[in-house]
Image: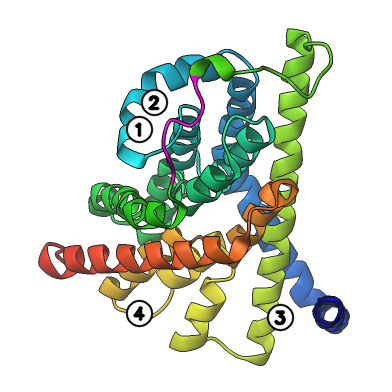
Amino acid sequence: MERSVMIKHRVLTIFLLSFFCLMLLYPKTVFLGASEGLLLWFQTVLPTLLPYMILNNLMIHTSALQWICRVAAPVLCRIFATSYYGSFAVLSGFLCGYPVGAKTTSDLLKKGQITYKEAAYLLSFCNNTSPVFVISYVVQQNLQDPALTTPFLLILFLSPVLSSFLFRKCYSLPGNIITESSLSFLESDPVQRKQADLFDVCIMNAFEALTRIGGYMMLFTIAIRILSEFFPEHPFTLLLYATLELSTGIRMIAQSSYPAAYKIIFSASLTTFGGWCCVMQTHSMTSETHIPMLPYIAEKLVTAVVTSLLISAYVYCFYTY
């Protein structure tokens, strides 16, 4: 065990030193990559995620969580075999976007409102791209075809739903693990916070999470730029670069020379997977709870395959060029 840890540390050290040296050798490339990543974060991710993340934090720490679960749980618990409060993670993950589903799952686990096993199950299917991002950024700004809005939303919603039926068998959940009466608000605080303090804490927590997301986006966009210096873009390497960071990857696919059908299929599949940057963001949001990432990655790849099959069927049967 100690030997494997030492090897991992050495590999990480070599990688970081190599990346740092490359950044010193290509300062202009680093500047362009950092500017591009932060601009995407500021113009796309910040306005689409920050409001939802603040409200999400507030709802988790107030009685709003109880009211929402009271309405959503009777339906979502039966469909997804989740607990009472797990239904809130499902709503957040499908409506708010990466990595709000992961953060909500982690917060509920830390508050003791879901179990570790259920948290791992929820993470397998409820950490998805938000409908706002799909409509505004993927379909309208990049693919520039409003006719794709409804098919994209339906397929990107249906894929994780279908995958959840497969994943739940791996976790053997009893369902409805936690009852409504077990809710304990702000249990990390000895004295319940005043409402004004709660707003401040939730806002700062959302900004901290969004800052980490921006940092990952910047680093991965720099990595794409540096790799492009050594391996110029062609159909194969472009796909590899696109999987590193979702926003940059979608734009690269849309601006490529791929046929329209391939652009649609690749964009939908990448949107479902989220890219390696989203994997790192998810790990950042769940690191305190130690939910393993390898099963999550495998589950996202399976869901991306389901998406590719569904979107391919749509493109070749119904889409007109």
| Residue in the picture at 37% in, 32% down | 77
Q: Are marks 1 and 3 in contact (CB under 8 Å)?
A: no
Return the residue at label 2.
73
| Residue in the picture at 12% in, 62% down | 318
- For the stretch drawn in magenta, what is the main secondary structure? loop
The magenta stretch spans residue 321: no
Return the residue at label 4.
258
| Residue in the picture at 24% in, 63% down | 310
Q: Are marks 2 and 1 in contact (CB under 8 Å)?
A: yes
Q: CA distance from mark 2 to mark 1?
A: 5 Å
| Residue in the picture at 70% in, 52% down | 290
Q: Amino acid at mark 1?
A: Leu
Mark nearer the N terminus (3 vs 2): 2
Q: Amino acid at mark 3?
A: Ile
User: Looking at the image, can residue 36 be seen?
Assistant: yes
Q: CA distance from mark 2 to mark 4?
A: 43 Å
Q: Nearer the viewer, residue 295 or 140?
A: 295
Mark nearer the N terminus (2 vs 4): 2
Return the residue at label 1.
76
User: Looking at the image, can residue 267 be seen?
Assistant: no
Mark nearer the N terminus (1 vs 3): 1
Mark nearer the N terminus (1 vs 4): 1
x, y percent for residue 159: 32, 55
| Residue interval drawn in magenta | 173-179
Q: Secondary structure at mark 2?
A: helix
Q: Secondary structure at mark 4?
A: loop
Return the residue at label 3.
226
